[in-house]
Amino acid sequence: MKKLPFSLIAGGLITGALLVAALLSRVWTPVDPTAMNILNRLKAPGEAGLLGADQIGRDVLSIIMAGAWTSLGIAVTATLLGGAIGTLVGVSAAAKGGAFERGTMAINGVLFSFPPILSAILLGALMGPGALTSITAIGVFMIPVFARVTRGAALQIWSRDFVQAARMAGKGPALITLQHVIPNISAQIIVQLAIQTGLGILSEAGLSFLGLGVAPPTPSWGRMLADAQTFLSAAPHLVLAPGLAIAAAVLGLNLLGDGLRDLTDPRRRQAS
Amino acid sequence: MMLSVQDLRVSFAREYGDPVEVIHGISVDLEKGETLGIVGESGSGKSVLSLATMGLLPRTARASGKILLDGEDILTMSERQLCRVRGRKIGMIFQEPMTALNPSMRVGAQIAEGLRLNRALSRRDARAEALRLLEMVQIPRAAERIDSFPHEMSGGQRQRVGIAIALALEPELLIADEPTTALDVTVQAEVLGILDELVSELGISLVLISHDLGVIARIADRTLVMYRGDEMEQGETEQVLRRPSHEYTRKLISALPGRVRASLEMSDG
Amino acid sequence: MLALKRLARQIGGLGIVLAIASLVIFLLIEAAPGDPASIILGTSASPDTVAALRTDLGLDRPLLLRYLSWIGGVFTGDLGNSYTYDTPVSALIANRLAVTAPLTLIATLLSIVISLPLGVWAANRPNGPVDTLASLFSQVGIAVPNFWIGLLLILGVALGLGWLTPGGFPGWDAGFWPALEALILPSIALAVPQSAVLTRVTRAAVIEVTNEDFIRTARAKGMSRTRALWRHAVPNALLPVVTMLGLQIPFLISGAVLVENVFTLPGIGTLAYQALSQRDLIVVQNVVLMFTLIVMVVNVIVDALYAVLDPRLRGRT
């Protein structure tokens, strides 16, 4: 008798809703998210649209929906890129060992000391703010995260009997990595992808809050909060909606990752 | 009667389904100064029996029946009362000397801890007493070893520390759960010897739990044979080992190495 | 001896890593558009004066030489002059560090004070009410952006209740309490996500240790559950907690940049951010290097702490 973990269901639902909002915003939003209507300026929720209007009268709900696309787009791209490079680094370090492993892991340590905001400040100096800066800054930070996780997982697989058997059969490290290691650590990679995408959304929001992220008029949750700061007492609703959107998106992805881990972790499987 | 277990049943709650009973009504008595051997394979419920006697069953466990220590029932005691019984009246030695000691605490402090807790000794007095205990369990150069961490000692030495901890408060009853199983064969005899000697010297009642009939044969006065939570038989150790009345006991004996079996038969003659 | 050797090797490794990191930072800033001389002089300056200033600043020297002179300056404390403020960068950084250092320190202390008892309490009764509350807190706390918490604190506490200051920093010259007061809300905003992470790690670590045999040994001595928990379980659970504390440093620094921005605190984060928008690249370059240095030094300290916490790791090479 096996129940699906609660976190998987809750995380799946929230992430699903986020995905639907993001995709839907490409074809439909209640109002054009860039349309200004100065008459609606700073109007409260209900008075103009479901979530009110911002300082230049744009519909908050529509910007939130469109912002989901931006946020998710940048976070997913950065995570996939960083994840792919990091995984490559991790599994090859595990496969090769020796000086190569020590070297790559040392470089990893360097990358890990560049949190997204720091790299974004550096990259911002080089190429100015924008989606590319955000993706690179976040992606670079994902590399050591994935490298560390996949190396550890891959090393465990390398110590198993069936890998030894494959080596005896004359298979090279590349083939073993492809045929035996990657399929066996894919569950851990997927779990990390979910959790790190959540972290990516959080970082993206921080970057656009500082003005280092996507440029206006592209809608973004972080910049909505930066704008809202100016009108904190006049229009508190402008602070609530984007913050809740970020928190819900990250919570959803974290829960999804936890749920997937509970589902796939062999130790948990034995316990139940 | 020092210890009297009467119709003890223990069951564990499960996440799904009904609780599972793992001990199905065990009764056994132990006189002062006597050594009781409990023998059985893993899963026979012998460790659960010892934890129940310490009042250390996990939360999910339910116990019925009685465990009388000097006439007082362990199973109905409050946690506060149990804390006064543990250490002072019952000491316990665990199977794994590797993990039974706190890795980040010096062994002297771990022995002294029980003394300071229960007897309100000063730091200096507790340390002196810990040193005496280390010498008692024959740790060489005890004055130096008192400040060692567990990982700096051998398995046999760690188990001696375990014995010192259990005996620190001079309990009336000592429970030793597979005290020599995790040790090298050469060290087993030494540790068992120390245990046997101290127990008879201090007049302590001992419950010795083991899957190894050879160990039981060496020091137990009486023996209880358990299988899957049931009593197979009990009686004088000699009686049980030489004239086993139960098929399961016969199987255990025939599984012994020839050398040990021979020694059983020799003492027969 | 072994421990010393290990430390020496770590510091050596740190040097190499820092050399690589500083070279990357230097090259990125070099490649950035914008000539420092024209930034300092403004757009109206004549080409001759710009060229003269370039020579003055040593910008016409070869790349390698300029890198080496920068690194030499890092060791002697001479980081050059800010392009926009015309003050030494080192003085600028020291000035701003007087805000950022206390901010991150208070936030870290706060997060430990919150998460350690909460995590231990939750672990004491898994799936009990406190545990449920703690896991709710850690799930939500990790997901909520700290700059949003900052905004909510300004809205609710400073503007709503009228307690504490909504932003700005009077400087330590204004007295200890007014300066500290300005740091309280920012520290809370910074501490919430940190304590969420730490609560989770503490809970997991303590639960793992409570299943160890030596906890049973302690209980067999007559020790109460609570006492065994604090005396034996918690000290042995600190290793993963300290590891996480070290791993969180990059996030703490990122968070500080954001939170300083929300509360308009004149800290290092604000300095870096402002320098970037004013293209004061020499400041950006040095601040980024300093952050990197802090992250790496903290990692070495965390490694050294391991040996203190776990005697089994002492003298291991």
Image (spheres, coloured by chain):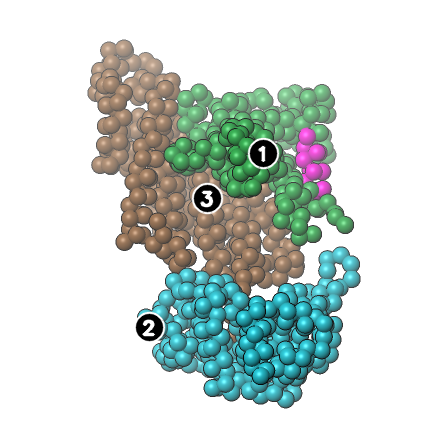
Q: Main secondary structure of the magenta part?
A: helix
Left or right relative to C44: residue B103 = right
Residue that badge 2 annotates: B141
Residue under the point 64% across and 29% down: A68
Q: Are marks 2 and 3 in contact (CB under 8 Å)?
A: no
Residue A33 left/right relative to A1: left
Query: Extreme right residue here?
Result: B18
**For residue B155, what is the image quadrant?**
bottom left
Residue topped by disc 3: C247
The answer to which of A89 and A97 lies nearer the viewer is A97
Q: Amino acid at mark 1?
A: His
Identify whether C201 is placed above or below B55. above
- Image colour assigned to chain C: brown
Q: Which residues are magenta?
A: A9-19
Distance CA(mark 2)–CA(mark 3): 43 Å
Give the letter of the green chain: A
